[in-house]
Image: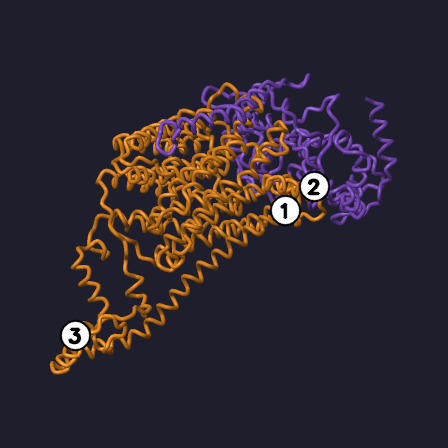
Amino acid sequence: MLNLHKDHRNLVLIAFGVFVALSIGVAIIPAYQMQGYEPIPGQKDLTVSERKGLGIYISEGCVACHTQQVRNIEMDAVWGERPSLASDYYYSKQRMDIWRQSPSILGSERTGPDLTDIGNRQPSDQWHLIHLYDPRLVVEASIMPSYSWLFRKTDTIALKDDDITLPRDITGMEGSDILVAKEEALQLVAYLKSLQQFSFEDAPPTDFIPALPKKDRNNGTTTTSTKSIGASLFQNNCAACHQTTGRGVKGAFPPLAGSLIVNDKNPEMLIKIILMGYDARQEYGMMPALADNLTDEEIKAIIDHVRSSWGNSASKVPVETITRLRDSILNIQ
Amino acid sequence: MKINLLLFLQTAEVSSENWLSSPGVIGTIVLVFIVLFLGIFIFIKRLNRYVDLLEDNTKDLTEEEFERRLINLEKKEVDEILEIRQQGFKEIKRQEDSSEGASKYSGFIQKIIDPKNPLFDEKARSTKKIKISKELKQIIVWYLGAGIFWLVFGTLVGQYLGMKFIWPDMDKISWLSFGRLRPVHTNTVFWGWASLAMVGLGHYVVSRTSNREIFNYKWSKIAFWLINSSVFVGNIFLMAGINNGGGEYREYIWPVMALFAIGIIITFFNFYKTVATRKISEIYISNWFILASLIWTIVLAIIGYFPSYQDGLGETVIQGYYMHQGVGMWFMTFTLGLVYYFLPSALNKPIYSYSLGVLAFWTQMLFYTLIGTHHFVFSPLPWWLQTVAIVFSAGMFIPVFASTLNFLMTMRGSWNQISKSYVLPFFLVGVVFYFVGSVQGSFQAFRFTNYLWHFTDFNVAHSHMTMYGIITFLMWACIYALLPKITGKEPPQNLVGAHFWLAFIGLIAYMVSLMVGGTLKGLSWIEGNPFIESVILMENYWVWRAVGGSLMFISHIIFAYNFYLMVRNKKGVTLSGLPDRQARKQTLQTQSK
């Protein structure tokens, strides 16, 4: 009837028709459905400068190495409190302009860390700027490109009041030169800091699918010593600034090795800094408050690790002290 | 039934303690070994021939002696031999039924024995020059030449990017930074190299199998310039930081991609009109694949760039569909069409089964279209879409088995071709990678393997297995099979061999290092180690990847030179380019030397 072997018209029409039908079913209809999702109540739109920052994020091709999706599997639990939802992308994934479509921020490759929640993990402007200028100044093993063209070199005398600068000594400036962040750098940092997973009251219970069966996982946790838990927590939460070696970054982030606060017999100051953050010293960047990110046990593991590493030798801290301080802070607030 | 079984296996094993026992992982290991065995097989075949050659060289002495004796024969002796021969001739005439010749000096050949020296037999170039019109030849050379330029450029960029993993501070120039350059590499080899080479070869196939000239050569030239300018302008935009949104293979903004799409539309009508006015009643199976891939790609480009359903995760659905179909409907389908013509024609025999080709065609369309979302397993996309993608990924076994079987059965009985030229080895590697790469891709869609490998460098290994191992190797096979026939010039076997082995070994190094590294990376993530450890552990694997990449790049330079040798206008370098008698004379001279 169709005589496909001899009738080229029928052959091409059928190949065309079936393909279009399948495409509508598997791409266009689901795409329309996904587009119909609404934002979570209370979720905020991007500000003007954050949106410009998103534009830079796309044009520099950051999506080639950084994902922005927390999958519902256990290994992704470190990147956010809950798996990503379609609504999370309501504001960020909109058509950019007439030339460029909605940005593909979900990504397909994780050469660098996931950025869904980077704004919570790393709220320090200073860290982001130094990291963009030269990632290896703050993360030694990083292979990220340095985005030095987002900064300009100028003379200290020519500085304006609202110029944001980088520390002179670690960036290797000579004479009276100093690095100033261009507007693009500030916009990109504003965008990165806006990347905070939106947490809401009636969020569905977080269930991340484990890679291995429950039985196996229990074995895993019992055999892991508290020491390595502390080291691992430190690596994930603190090492970006204070470095794995505990030496910090000169002129940006203070060292923990040999620090008086860390080694103090009375750990209360240290605990308070971790819970409430710290911005008392001009020469260093701001330390974010971590009370909401870490449990008392986790803070204890980190403190014990910090107080017994890199030549530090101070006593362990009881969990009760941390709980007591947390409560008293809550009372003040 | 098969699909059910596989799914059952898969769900049963997801909760296994040992990741190594997951069927996807085991399957992939088996597949990698298939490739390694293939390499060894081809190597031994070639080595065998080389050893034969060495032996032959020693035998040359006896032959030379024989020749000397012939030359030094006295007139009397010659007369005697002549007399014996004449006698033998008479004897044969007398007893015609007798199978035994009376005299062994009769001069008649009683039995053909294996030629002692393959130097004379096998190395004889059997290349028949095929007469084609000047216009067609020009178009093919244009398309292939431009394609090869983009291949060298694109892989140079790729090689540079690979080195940036080891030395991230190689440069601090904005337009050379990793994020901007990566899409330049992928888009150049996609829309520049592979697309131009495919369309160029497609011109020959469509014209030959329709037994007429291409409908309009002017259209071909317009399409040529459109596609090239799209790649050229697109790359400049990408380096300037102007891209469509970062979705893979959709990085060119729409005005640039429109140039490409118009080029494809023109090509489609050109080919369609040619097929429509063919002088043979049947449409050869290659034309099914070629016409369909053109029409599918036009649809794909329109759906991929049409704006009205691309906000929010709508864009992600389309991205999964588009990037998968870009490979499956454009490159894979078109290339299969080319192989259905060039493989049988290179071996000078018909394709094993026409019906299997038809089966592969329809299942390719049905299953490949449905599985795009397997690039987003565990993502916030609807679960039904992900399930459909996983199930039909297993369905992909059908077209893959059908075509692989068809090609291998066509090659059966011609294995000795491997030792004669490099055309068959290129085909064989491409076909085996077609099987291995596609099956591995389906395995990777399974839940546990996706858990382990997604987001790691394993993806990069997979995409090079397919776009390089399948498409590029098959493209080379077709080019080496076709060009000598239409230009009458062949590059030296040593150079083709160097191209083959550097590309093959380079690809193996590239693939294995990233597969091993990617697996370790995935395991490190599963264990919950700090992220930076997964960067540190990759360091050595990235070095090996760069080494493999360098070998591949060198092979492309050699290939470009081989191409130059095949198409240059200077005459008289290769024997087959010379008039027959002169060639024979020259052969005799070289032999007697």
User: In the rendered image, which quarter is residue B188 located in?
Assistant: top left
Q: Is residue B156 visible?
A: no
User: In the rendered image, which quarter is residue A266 located in?
Assistant: top right
Q: Please report the residue visible at 42 percent of the width from the left and 61 percent of the height from the top.
A: B45
What SS does tag 3 mark? helix
Q: Mark 3: which amino acid?
A: Lys
Q: Mark 2: which amino acid?
A: Ala
Q: Is residue B175 visible?
A: yes
* Residue at image mark 3: B90
Above or below: residue B592 compared with residue A50: below
- Spatial CA distance of label 1 from label 2 is 15 Å
Instruction: Provide the chain ID for the residue under circle 2.
Output: A
Task: Decide if residue A134 is on the left or right side of residue A262.
Answer: left
Q: Please report the residue visible at 56 percent of the width from the left and 44 percent of the height from the top.
A: B458
Other residues around mark 2 within 10 Å, as few (<14) / some (14–19) / many (≥20): many
Foreground mark, 2 or 3, reads 3
Colour of chain B in the rendered structure image: orange
The lab-note entry on whether marks 2 and 3 share a chain reads: no
- Spatial CA distance of label 2 from label 3 is 88 Å
Question: In what quadrant of the picture does the C terminus of chain B appear?
Answer: bottom left
- Chain for colour purple: A
Return the x and y of residue B280 as percentages of the image width and height. 29, 36
What SS does tag 1 mark? helix
Task: Decide if residue A295 is on the left or right side of residue B348.
Answer: right
* Residue at image mark 1: B23
* Residue at image mark 2: A211
Instruction: Provide the chain ID for the residue under circle 1.
Output: B
Q: Mark 1: which amino acid?
A: Pro
Return the x and y of residue B343 as percentages of the image width and height. 37, 47
